[in-house]
């Protein structure tokens, strides 16, 4: 079996036979009005992490991680300014050391850069560096009211796709995770019902519909 890198989320690691293959890009697709950031924060506890924030400031992200109720690490957080975000992100990615985590939150900002060929070049460089260093990249793909037109490219580059759907059922907030794509491996066929209160765990209170 190829080298697997733990996500830090036990339920996922069990489903994925130990984790994600080293050298993979993961697209975490979720509504901005969700607890998807728990996935990102728990990942920081597994190994050295570079957290690139495209929206929030370094201080805001660091405070959120530090105050998170789940177990976290001490990632290096960098804010990518509005000017030339692809260039600035690319410089930081190129310095990522061996067997590290890279988080890009959210990737939507990069998906809107023109011309589209620059984003594809960035993704090719990212894919090569993540593979060569045996690292793991997680791209936070917001699925709110405006989906960038290059989202198809992002999902095509991604080796693994996590689709988190958050909704309400009566008085309950429900979270369901599907993994429709797992390049080079077997994607779980079932949808996982999650409890996203203080950490990412299986919701055992109700059966999956």
Image (cartoon, rainbow, N blue to C red):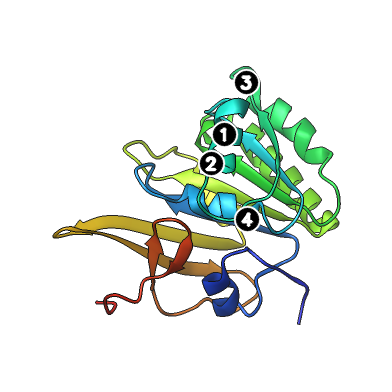
- Residue visible at 21% across and 56% down? 168
Asked whether disc 3 touches disc 1, contact meaning CB atoms under 8 Å apart, the reply is no
Say how many tags the image has: 4
Element on which disc 3 rests: loop
Residue placed under numbered mark 4 in the picture: 43
The answer to whether residue 50 of the structure is visible from this angle is yes
Quote the CA–CA distance across marks 3 and 2: 24 Å
Point out the tag, 3 or 1, that comes first from the N-terminus: 1
Helix, strand or loop at mark 4: helix
Q: Earlier in the sequence, mark 3 or mark 4?
A: 4
Tag 4 near tag 2, CB within 8 Å: no
Q: Give the mark nearer the N terminus: 4 vs 1.
A: 4
Crowdedness near tag 4: few (<14), some (14–19) or many (≥20) residues, C-alpha within 10 Å:
many
Q: Which mark is residue 63?
A: 1
Residue bearing the label numbered 3: 81
Q: Residues within 10 Å of mark 2 (few under 14, many from 20)?
A: few
Residue on which disc 2 sits: 67
Circles 1 and 2 in contact, beta carbons < 8 Å: yes
Q: Position of residue 73 (x, y in %)?
A: 68, 50
Please name whichever residue, 166 or 65, is drawn nearer the observer in this view of the structure.
Answer: 65
């Amino acid at each position: 079996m190829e080298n697997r890198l733990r996500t830090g989320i036990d339920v996922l690691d069990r489903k994925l036979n130990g984790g994600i293959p080293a050298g993979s890009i993961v697209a975490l697709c979720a509504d901005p009005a969700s607890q998807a950031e728990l996935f990102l924060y728990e990942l920081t506890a597994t190994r050295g992490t570079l957290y690139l924030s495209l929206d929030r400031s370094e201080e805001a992200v660091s405070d959120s991680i530090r105050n998170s109720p789940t177990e976290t690490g001490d990632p290096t957080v960098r804010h990518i300014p509005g000017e030339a975000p692809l260039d600035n992100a690319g410089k930081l990615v190129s310095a990522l050391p061996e067997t590290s985590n890279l988080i890009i939150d959210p990737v939507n900002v990069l998906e809107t850069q023109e011309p589209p060929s620059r984003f594809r070049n960035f993704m090719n460089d990212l894919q090569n560096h993540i593979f060569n260093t045996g690292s793991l990249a997680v791209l936070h793909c917001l699925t709110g009211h405006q989906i960038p037109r290059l989202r198809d490219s992002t999902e095509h580059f991604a080796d693994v796709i996590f689709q988190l759907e958050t909704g309400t059922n009566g008085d309950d907030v429900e979270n369901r995770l599907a993994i429709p794509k797992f390049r080079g491996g077997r994607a779980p066929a079932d949808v996982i019902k999650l409890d996203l209160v203080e950490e990412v765990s299986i919701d055992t209170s109700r059966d999956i519909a």
